[in-house]
Image (cartoon, helix red, strand yellow):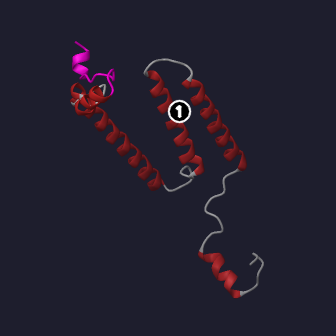
């Protein structure tokens, strides 16, 4: 059915819904895709630079920027209703809060973590495979 169709059904459908929700200029899409590609290359390059535990924070930071670009331009949040942006930001903050609580909880049981095999498995390995790694608690290793 073309837009110039004179049938009465085409006029009724044209007023019901718009043809497209939102058109994004091609230059914005290409710029966003180029930025995502550049950030992906930077993520891979950062992998080969050793700055200790800071590597994780750099990778997470780059991932957050990439997710923001995708949500803003490819998911059309820039042009959408403010309520949808509020829902997106609220959900993101909830996920960050949940991960923060999980990370805080790991310090509660850190002293009971084993670095090697579980004790019963180690007994079996000692009987059947002498020289297998010995299980020690992290607290025993740090002494």
Residue that carries the numbered disc 1 in the rendered image: 62
Quarter that holds the N terminus: bottom right
Q: Nearer the viewer, residue 34 or 83?
A: 34
The residue at the point 32 percent across, 36 percent down is: 100
Numbered label tally: 1
The residue at the point 28 percent across, 26 percent down is: 126
The residue at the point 52 percent across, 42 percent down is: 67
Whether 127 is drawn above or below 22: the answer is above
Q: Position of residue 131 (x, y in %)?
A: 33, 20
Q: Position of residue 71 (x, y in %)?
A: 53, 47
Whether 101 is drawn above or below 26: the answer is above
Q: Position of residue 78 (x, y in %)?
A: 55, 49
Q: Name the quadrant containing residue 40.
A: top right
Q: Secondary structure at mark 1?
A: helix
The residue at the point 60 percent across, 72 percent down is: 17
Q: Nearer the viewer, residue 24 or 55?
A: 55
Image check: 118 left or right of 96?
Answer: left
For this orientation, the residue located farthest to the top is 143
Q: Name the quadrant containing residue 125.
A: top left
Image check: 67 left or right of 38?
Answer: left
Image check: 110 left or right of 57?
Answer: left
Disc 1 packing (10 Å; few <14; some 14–19; many ≥20): some
**Magenta segment, which residues?**
129-143
Quarter that holds the C terminus: top left
Q: Position of residue 104 (x, y in %)?
A: 27, 32
Whether 13 is drawn above or below 134: the answer is below
């Amino acid at each position: 059915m073309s837009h110039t169709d004179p049938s009465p059904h085409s006029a009724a459908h044209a007023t019901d819904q718009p043809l497209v929700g939102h058109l994004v200029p091609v230059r914005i899409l290409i710029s966003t895709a180029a930025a995502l590609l550049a950030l992906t290359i930077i993520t891979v390059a950062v992998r080969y630079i050793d700055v200790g535990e800071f590597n994780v924070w750099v990778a997470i930071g780059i991932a957050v920027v990439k997710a923001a670009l995708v949500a803003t331009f490819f998911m059309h949040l820039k042009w959408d209703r403010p309520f949808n942006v509020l829902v997106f930001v609220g959900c993101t903050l909830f996920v960050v809060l949940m991960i923060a609580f999980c990370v805080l909880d790991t310090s509660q049981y850190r002293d009971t973590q084993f670095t090697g095999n579980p004790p019963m498995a180690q007994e079996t390995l000692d009987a059947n495979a002498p020289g297998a790694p010995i299980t020690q608690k992290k607290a025993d290793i740090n002494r």
